[in-house]
Image: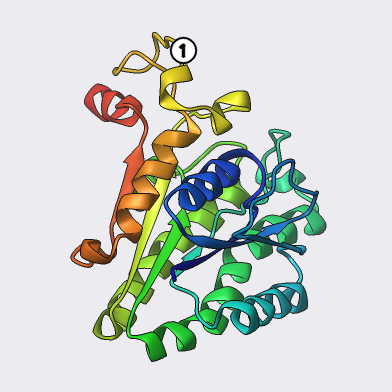
Amino acid sequence: MRHAFITAGTKGLGQAVTKRLLAEGWHVSALHRSQADFSHERLTLFKADVTDRDDLIDAVRQAIEKHGRIDALILNAGPYIFERKQLVDYTDTEWDEVITGNLTASFWLLREVLPYMRKQNFGRIITYGFPESATAPGWVCRSAFAAAKSGMVSLTKSVALEEAEHGITANMVNPGNIIGENKTKMIAESGPDDNTPVGRSGTGEDIARTISFLLDQKSGMITGAVIDVTGGVNVVHQARR
């Protein structure tokens, strides 16, 4: 039995990943804030606030009690302030939500899950960033999110190094500009996109396929990697510099 634990696993990109894993035979424990619009016999839902430490730890322990193991931890949740604002205009609450929900919550979950993975001598950790986050770029009017995700790059690589001897890998996936309904679409449903070198919009399936590959038992040589899934958009940006 393979068991994956995913945050925000019922909407958007998380839903695409959850459905992919279920189709591949995984048992999935998915955290959510609003009820999922789909069900499956191998899907267990936990309502939890990703900024609440007790919610997260309780969900992990319930998932372990039910399944006995966690083979993959997918840190899909990423609180984000949609209004564009400069750093001086952030409230303490907004800053705390973004940093806690993206970075500190990852620490809480990793600290809880890694001991189980060590006992199994196997585990797969997936985190999310944004294109080029590996270089810690500035992002105008997105300072909180950029800071949290740049921190996640270093955290992911640190975990990759610390846990390699235990058969555990940690990698980051950076989705490109996948928005709206495209987050849950299949590749065959993607539309043309003149702003993307590959000529089409990105989809949830693009991200799910990448994660599925990284979770494979034979993908153990890939760890500490930061993988941009952008259709080449950020490559164009680099060429223009």
Percent coordinates x, y for residue 155 in the rendering: 43, 69
Colouring rule applied to residues: rainbow
- Closest to the observer, 63 or 234: 63
Residue 210, compared with residue 152, is above or below; it is above
Q: Is residue 10 left or right of residue 176?
A: right
- Name the amino acid type tagged 1: Gly
Percent coordinates x, y for residue 193 in the rendering: 42, 11
Residue 119, compared with residue 216, is above or below; it is below
For image coordinates 43% across by 60% down, the residue present is 126
- Look at the image and tell me in which quarter the N terminus lies: bottom left
Picture quadrant of residue 61: bottom right
Q: Is residue 211 left or right of residue 62?
A: left
For image coordinates 46% across by 12% down, the residue present is 191
Is residue 236 among what the camera can see? yes
- Look at the image and tell me in which quarter the C terminus lies: top left
For image coordinates 64% across by 77% down, the residue present is 60
- Closest to the observer, 44 or 114: 44
Residue 95, compared with residue 107, is above or below; it is above
Is residue 136 among what the camera can see? no
Query: Which residue extends farthest front?
Result: 41
Q: For the image shown, how many numbered marks are present on the structure?
A: 1
- Closest to the observer, 19 or 150: 19
Q: Is residue 223 left or right of residue 129?
A: left
For image coordinates 29% across by 17% down, the residue present is 197
- Closest to the observer, 152 or 209: 209
Residue carrying label 1:
191
Percent coordinates x, y for residue 170 in the rendering: 36, 67
Picture quadrant of residue 236: top left
- Element at badge 1? loop
